[in-house]
Amino acid sequence: MTLMSSNFAKGAPGFLAVLSFAIAVSASAIPKTPVPDQWAGSSVVILEDSLLLDFQPAKDRNNLDVREHCWYKVSPSGGADIRAFTFWDAEFIESRPDIDVTTYDSLGNRDRLGGSCFVRERSSENPNVKYSLYFGKTGSFETTVVIPSFDRVRYILTSVHRPHMKPAFVGRYVMRNRFPTVHKTVLISSPMGTDLFWGISSGEGLALDTSTAVDRKRIVTRIACSNLIPLPDRLLEHSEQWLASIELRIPPKGPRLYSWKDLGEYGLDIMESEQKPSRSADSIASTLPSDRSKVLQAAFSYVKQHLRYYGSWEGTHGFVPRSCEDVLRNGYGDCKELATVLCALLRAKGVSAGLALLSARAVFPEMNLAYPTMGVFNHVIVAVHTDSGFRYLDPTVNFANAGNSYFRLAGRKTLVLARGASCVDSVVEAPGFRNEVRSASKLLMRANGAWVIEGELWHYGLAAQDLESVLESRINQTETTALSGYLKSAFRINAASPVVRTNTADSVCVSFSCSFDECAIRVPHPGFVVKVPSLCSWFAPDPDAVDEGPVACRDFAQTDAWIVPEGKTMHSAFAALDKECFRGSWKIRNDTLSRTFASRPALFTSAKSPECRKFAVERSRFEKGTVWKE
């Protein structure tokens, strides 16, 4: 990512002619842009796509005026046309976007399909235009324009105006579209002297033409590219991770960026309900133990047992938590609201605790310490002050306790909110951090002469949480069915009736039994080769996933042991792993064959894809070991 500041951008005046084009694309003349030969048969081609990001600083709250204009060329193709164009905004919008859609024939005759201010949960009277809103995991707004079929070529002009007024101060705009695009232009405009930081990320190596000009005391930067190929839908979900994109960071108020400490104060201001006293929280806290060694778990358990996670982000509640009284009365809350209640309980017991902001998913950008912004945060947890630093608790994690709820967040940077003392920190792995799988199996012959393998798989720490999430998220499945699918995909265990033996916040034990079939142990002459359980597939870099974006590999350890029937001679020529981030070995002792594997934290990018593919082959070879020779 290359970041730049409008403070030092310079160029020749007279550039606003291009800016004027972006603000008001001429609807009187259809673009004469020729379509490249390779897209001549496409039902939809974008001729011109322009985006204006106009920064307007203000004393109370800065605005980002976003205007998009897009010319589509739509050709009839026997009913196979793509009829729907969807506009997304993954941030919370306080103002409603204006949308206008007009079609033109080749002679310039036009027909306005529809356009009006976005109306929440109300459809337009025009049946061709549907406005809808939903609050999913990302709290996204969705507006869909349905284009009817045509018997001849049509040109469609869509204009979208989004005035942003939000506390995110960051935007990410991907250069590509789901349709082939002949030309794309992005304009970034801001007053001179403002701390407007923008950057281009182009991991795919897209050729971009960039120029800057000054006119009427404003700085305008133009980024353009041509002949953009379309991409499959699966690459668009988190496309900013690997496609060329523009990142924009603006101050929340006035022309100057905040420091991280300033942002902490701002975060506390917009979460003012977090600071209000709560009689209900005080009453609940009075029933909790006063011993500090017990109060953390007691308060954490109360929140887990009496409140459920539910993301209800209507209006300002996208970033302002409801009060403790409201959350306790409702019996549910999102991450910031559950964290608010947990903070209130701990403070009532004399424990110094506050809120901390971070990104819970890898698809959100990592904090860049040089450019403070609230836009990189999508999750709120609790930071407890201790003599050795902060200890973090995440009350949204199911099947966790106060000691291990942070496991999935280890290594991420946080912004700890504290009046006059907000600071950047990292979630570090405490001495009790554990991410491990252990198995113990026996190779047995049944009375009917059939060989089977019986064993137990113990999951600890993050591995246990991952298994619990599989069992919790099953839809229209029994626990046995969900567990069977998990064992087969993660360990290649084709077990008919696996059973959960032990299930706690720290560990989960699963027992299994399977035959010597293709998914378990094959029988080449003259010996048995064991490959069940395989190494857990969840903690290894997937070469295909690495091609689509950075993949983080966590600390992980797996130990497997097999007891071989008496009288069998085991073979000892096993493969070993000795890599920078991975170690593995096999051992024989008496009647037991064992295998150990361990990985260290590492980040794999598309540049390491060949290395990951080679490692995948070596890892597969290492997984198998000859148990004995006849």
Image: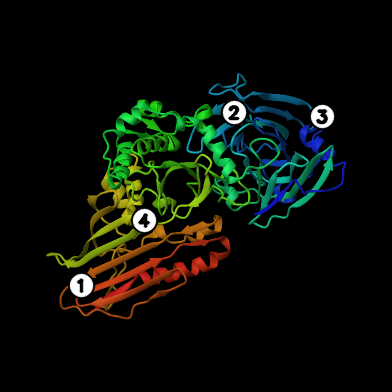
Q: Quadrant of residue 97?
A: top right
Whole-number angstrom distance, CA of label 4 to CA of label 1: 25 Å
Q: Toward which corner of the image does residue 448 lie, by quadrant?
A: bottom left
Residue type of the residue flagged with mark 3: Ser
Q: Say if mark 2 contacts mark 4, CB within 8 Å.
A: no
Q: Quadrant of the N terminus?
A: bottom right
Residue in the picture at 60% in, 44% down = 373
- Where is residue 388, by image quadrant? bottom left
Q: What numbered label is drawn on residue 564?
A: 1
| Residue 211 in the image, given as x and y percentages of width and height | 80, 49
Q: Earlier in the sequence, mark 2 or mark 1?
A: 2
Mark 4 crowdedness (10 Å alpha carbons): few <14, some 14-19, many ≥20: some
Residue position for label 4: 489
Distance between the alpha carbons at the discs numbered 2 and 1: 66 Å
Q: CA distance from mark 2 to mark 4?
A: 43 Å
Q: Which residue is mark 3?
A: 28
Element on which disc 1 rests: loop
Label 2 or label 4, whichever comes before in sequence order = 2
N-terminal label among 4 and 1: 4
